Amino acid sequence: MLTPRQAEILGIIRSEPLVAQQELAGRLGISRSAVAGHIMQLTEMGLIRGRGYLLSEADYVCVVGGANVDIEGRVPGPLTFADSNIGTVKRSPGGVGRNIAENLARLGVSTRLITGLGRDDLGAWLHDQTAGAGVDLAHTIWSESAPTATYLSVIDGSGEMAVAINDMAVMTAVTTAALDARRDALAHAAAVVVDCNLTSESLGHVVSDLAVGPVFVDPVSSAKAERIAPLLASVHTLKPNRAEAALLSGVDISGKRSLRTAASALLDLGVHRVVISLGADGLFFADGETSGTLPQPTYPVVSVTGAGDALMAGLVHAHLAKLPLEEAARFGLTAAAVTARSDRPVAPDLSTETIYELIEKEAS
């Protein structure tokens, strides 16, 4: 099992394989000999090898899910419905799967994204923006008929989303045949992340037939969560919100007791780990042996858009680092807090170093 310091060092090495030990020591505020000791232990674990701290060739994550152009409208105070609101409008790369992939890349994880894009200007822009962030898009599925997906959201002065509309028709291009053509990328991944923007057929094909490593699932919304219901026995980590957890477990969640009951029901259905996002109340985690609630870190909220995607990326990163569930949940929750204090769906300052710094500050 990795210590938090070892996980931090491994995260830096993932993004900078040639980083010098003295540079690592300076960044982390520890001695070079301490760094050397951690690296020797990581080598003995088989997590790094050879000159330049080469990582295992299989040490990549494959994300299968939505990518879209986010158009966000923001008002400085309360939203006035049925009227024009003075505010700002901006465009940015988005999509649950795409955001998770970029967050993983920023955490130093080699990441491949399988998604559908329209053969249009927005698709080219979204592809270039995502590839520029370090995500491997060699397996993109290009549609000649459907436009690139668009997500339109309105954020009020509290940073909460008031309403949103998504046009994800292009995801029908991610067919079982298209996924079969990308079988090797899925089969050799250290972990596979899927979101429920996939059609039920394609989702089932990935989860049941193509993924070999552990599968992490983001239900996306209550409307789409039902697509994963028949496949829960094949899910390693499920990250629903309250409404999605209630729908999938059949338990009305109204308090701590019902939260535990819902998580137990999901575990009984075969899910290995459940992490339920509670919004401003933090999260609840359970795996059959341990469970608990973590409060939301005390940082200002600028926008919650993308925070759940950062949480999922943090959970995947922590799994690769072999962190126990509570530490993994705290790492993911802090990643979400870093994102929520940014005005972008993916925080430009997200890194393992930033996350551990905030965890230490919160604990002090």
Image: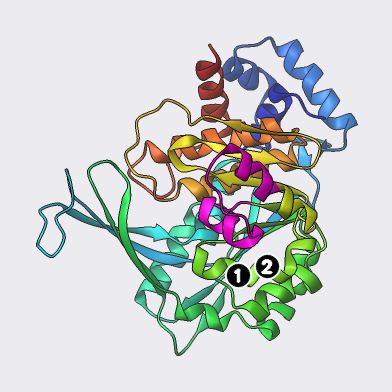
Check disc 1 and report the residue beneath it: 226
Whether residue 254 appears in this view of the structure is: yes
Q: Residues at badges 1 and 2 in contact (C-beta under 8 Å)?
A: yes
- Predominant secondary structure, magenta span: helix
Q: Residue furthest right?
A: 44
Which residue is drawn at the image coordinates 52% and 37% (left, top)?
Answer: 335
Residue type at mark 2: give it: Ala
Of residue 269 and residue 221, the one placed in the foreground of this image is: 269
Check disc 2 and report the residue beneath it: 229
Q: Position of residue 11 (x, y in %)?
A: 65, 35
Q: Position of residue 149 (x, y in %)?
A: 41, 73
The correct choice, above or below, for 171 with respect to 235 in the image is below
Q: Image quarter for residue 45?
A: top right
Instruction: Provide the residue span drawn in magenta.
Output: 239-263
Q: Position of residue 331 (x, y in %)?
A: 60, 33
Which residue is drawn at the image coordinates 75% and 24% (left, top)?
Answer: 3
As helix, strand or loop, the secondary structure at mark 2 comes to helix
The correct choice, above or below, for 94 with respect to 42 in the image is below
Which residue is drawn at the image coordinates 31% and 60% (left, top)?
Answer: 163
169 lies left or right of 46? left
